[in-house]
Amino acid sequence: MPAFIKENDLLMEEKMDDEATIGEGIVVKDAESIINLFLQFAVKEYKIYNPKTLLPEKEKPLVIISAHGPQWAPAPIMFILGKYFLDNGLGDIVGSFYPHPLFMRVPGMKAIFGRLGVPTKVYDLPGLVDRLNDGRIQVTGTAPEGIYCNFQWEDYVGPYDNAGMVAAAVLSQAKLVLIAHQGGDAWNFQANLPFGWTLPIPGGLRGVNIPIGPVRRIDRYAMLAKKYKPALKKAELETASTKERKLLIGLEVAKIRTQLNLMTEDLQQREAKLLASKNGKKKVEK
C-alpha cells in the first residue's frame, strides 16, 4: 500500500461504494443472515415444485411474476428463492423485488427497502430495463395485483394494478418465470361479504383482506414455478404507439393472470394429494 493512502481512506471509500449500491438491488450472499433468520422463525417447512425452472439462464436476466393474494402471502417467496440461490452456488447474483410504489411514500420506508434489495433508485421502466440488460440487476420480480391485494376476488389472483414488470421482461428479453404459492394466507384475515355475495364488478369482489402480519409461523409454504414465454416480442413493443403498447401489454397480462390462477389450482391439488398421502400413511402406521 502506498504511504500516502491511509487505511481510513480505504474504509471510507468502501463505505461510499456500499452507499452507492443501496437502492440498486442486493447481492444475495449479503442477505444470507436475514434469509436464514426469516426461514428459521417464520416458515416451518417449504417446498418448491419445479425448482430448476428458477435457475437463471446464461447471459439472461430472470424476471419473476408471482401471484399475490393477501398482502403478506407472497413475502416468503423472496427468502425461499434467496436460500435456493445460495444452496446452488449463486450467492453473487444481484437480486431485487418491487413492492407497491405507495410504500415508498411512508416516511423512512424508502431507506429500509433500499437496504433490503428494493431498487428504490429505479422505479421507472427504462431504468429497470437498462439494469437488466447490463447486469446490474440480474433477478427481479413483483406481484402485479398491487393495491388490489387488499380485496378478495372470485379468483385467487385478482385484477392487476401494474403491468410494468411484464413490459420490462419483454424489453430486456429476460427469462420469465411465474410463481403460484400456498400457505401465506395464514398471515391474513378474510372478511367476506355476507351470504357469499359477490359485487358485480370486474373480477368479482367478494370481500377484503385484513393483514395480521407474521405473528405465527407458517406450517408449510409451497411454491409452483413455471417458465412462461410471452407471445409479445420486443420489436413489437418498441415500435408500437402508446395506445398500441397499452393494448399489447394488456393482452399479455391477461394471459399471465389466467395462467397463474390455473397454477394456483394445480398447486392446491398437489398439496391436497400430498396431505392425503401423509394422512393415509399415518393411519397405516397406527
Image (cartoon, rainbow, N blue to C red):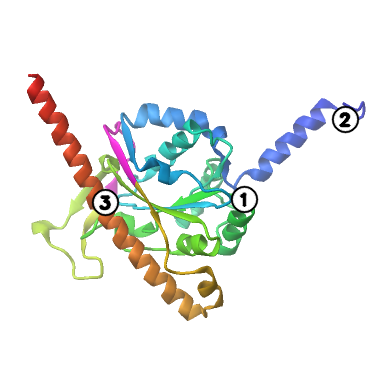
Q: Which residues are magenta?
A: 209-224
User: Where's residue 94, x and y in %?
Assistant: 57, 43
- The residue depicted at 45 percent of the width and 28 percent of the height is 36
User: Where's residue 45, x and y in %?
Assistant: 31, 30
Label placed on residue 135: 1
- The residue depicted at 48 percent of the width and 57 percent of the height is 101
Q: Would residue 171 be seen by someone viewing this image from the given angle?
A: yes
In the displayed structure image, the side of residue 10 where residue 43 appears, left or right: left
Label 2 belongs to which residue? 5
For the C terminus, the quadrant is top left
Whole-Å distance between the Cαs marked 2 and 1? 32 Å
Residue 129 within the magenta-colored segment of the rendering: no
Whole-Å distance between the Cαs marked 1 and 3? 31 Å
Label 3 belongs to which residue? 264
Q: Looking at the image, which is closer to me, 36 or 249?
A: 249
Mark 1 or mark 3, which has the lower sequence index? 1
Q: Decide: is 260 above or below 214.
A: below
Please count the marks in the image: 3
User: Where's residue 58, x and y in %?
Assistant: 56, 48
- Three-letter code for the amino acid on which mark 1 is drawn: Gly
